[in-house]
């Protein structure tokens, strides 16, 4: 996968040399380049911001450097096969403008929420281009114009406000890179296929069996794989009920059997029915 990142703080991405992402870069699984937006400024002060039209606090990123950056990193790709005189999509053409154009991702608090499902979607792309805003964000016309030549997704990590898009890109890249073939190996594929999907995980323990007066639950040392699986499932259900009632409510009711319902009931929780309570 090819990844380009544009930012006024390229130094933010130094950690991408480390650990498993660094390894994926070293072995060619991830071809990552970080670009300084100021490369595409032309004034002596290398200005990237200006005051907002309509007033209000803060500054907005000017469109011109962004326009040149996107031109350089996502050259207008000829539609494969060209267009027909009627304007219809010709045979063999790809409606999104062709595989040559990257998918542009723009972190913003107003974006579509980033999820594991989106990480899977992005891991299937061949080229991602990230635009990191600062100040109050990027002039909207940059995104509107880019959308005439490539797929553009405004994305948000969650409902809190960061200083800029850089940390969001680190998070997204980490989630996407671990899904690329060969990055995690077997541990990863098992994790992704897990049938505990839709629930939080049970707690994990390692040696020693007793530490500072706290024991590892006896069941995990019993060697009884049936009991262990049941215990983990019960813990996952109860944790999810306490910490993420939204996730529990979203489970298809048929995914909970009688033993699951009994475990929730013992914990004092109402298992989801699939009906909206009135
Ligand atoms: C990109 C600039 C800072 C600050 C305006 C926001 C009411 C807008 C993000 N989950 C996430 N939180 N924050 C970001 C994010 C923040 C960014 C940029 C991503 C570029 N900023 C900023 C204030 C505002 N207010 C709430 C108005 C942006 C992601 N992904």
Image: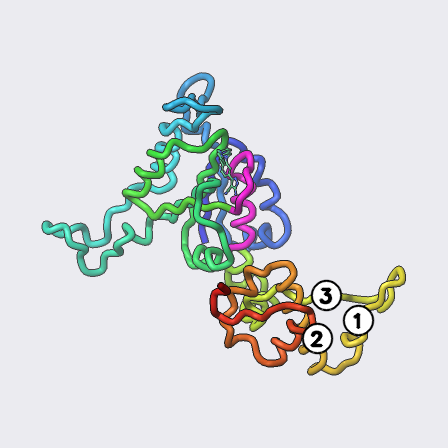
SS class, disc 2: helix
Q: Residues within 10 Å of mark 1 (few under 14, many from 20)?
A: few
Q: Which mark is residue 231?
A: 2
**Alpha-carbon distance for marks 3 and 1?**
10 Å
149 in relation to 192, above or below = above
Q: Earlier in the sequence, mark 1 or mark 2?
A: 1
Q: Position of residue 210 (x, y in %)?
A: 87, 66
Q: Which mark is residue 204?
A: 3
Is 168 positioned to the left or the right of 42 in the image?
right
Q: Earlier in the sequence, mark 3 or mark 2?
A: 3
Q: Position of residue 95 (x, y in %)?
A: 26, 54
Residue for badge 1: 217
Q: Earlier in the sequence, mark 3 or mark 1?
A: 3
SS class, disc 1: loop
Residue displayed at 52% across by 71% down = 273
Report if the CB atoms under discs 1 and 2 are less than 8 Å apart: yes
Residue displayed at 45% across by 16% down = 44
Q: Nearer the viewer, mark 3 or mark 1?
A: 1
**Alpha-carbon distance for marks 3 and 2?**
12 Å
Q: Position of residue 142 (x, y in %)?
A: 35, 35
Residue displayed at 49% across by 63% down = 278
């Amino acid at each position: 996968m090819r990844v380009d990142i544009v930012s006024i703080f390229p130094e933010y991405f130094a950690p991408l040399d480390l650990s498993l992402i660094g390894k994926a870069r070293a072995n060619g699984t991830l071809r990552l380049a970080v670009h300084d937006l100021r490369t595409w400024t032309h004034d002596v002060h290398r200005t990237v911001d200006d005051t907002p039209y309509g007033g209000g606090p803060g500054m907005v990123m000017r469109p011109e450097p962004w326009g040149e950056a996107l031109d350089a990193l996502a050259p207008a790709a000829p539609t494969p096969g060209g267009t027909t005189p009627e304007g219809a999509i010709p045979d063999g053409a790809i409606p999104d403008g062709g595989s040559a154009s990257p998918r542009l991702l723009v972190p913003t608090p107003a974006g579509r929420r980033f999820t594991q499902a989106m990480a899977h979607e992005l891991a299937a792309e061949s080229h991602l281009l990230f635009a990191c805003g600062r100040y109050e964000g990027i002039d909207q016309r940059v995104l509107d114009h880019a959308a005439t030549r490539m797929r553009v997704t405004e994305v948000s990590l969650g409902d809190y406000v960061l200083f800029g898009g850089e940390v969001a890109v680190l998070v997204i890249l980490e989630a996407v890179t671990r899904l690329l073939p060969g990055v995690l190996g077997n541990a990863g594929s098992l994790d992704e296929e897990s049938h505990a999907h839709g629930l939080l995980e049970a707690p994990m323990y390692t040696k020693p069996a007793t530490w500072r007066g706290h024991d590892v639950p006896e069941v995990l040392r019993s060697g009884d794989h049936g009991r262990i699986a049941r215990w983990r499932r019960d813990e996952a259900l109860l944790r999810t009920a306490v910490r993420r009632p939204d996730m529990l409510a979203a489970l298809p009711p048929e995914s909970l059997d009688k033993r699951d319902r009994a475990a929730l009931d013992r914990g004092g929780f109402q298992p989801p029915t699939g009906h909206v309570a009135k």
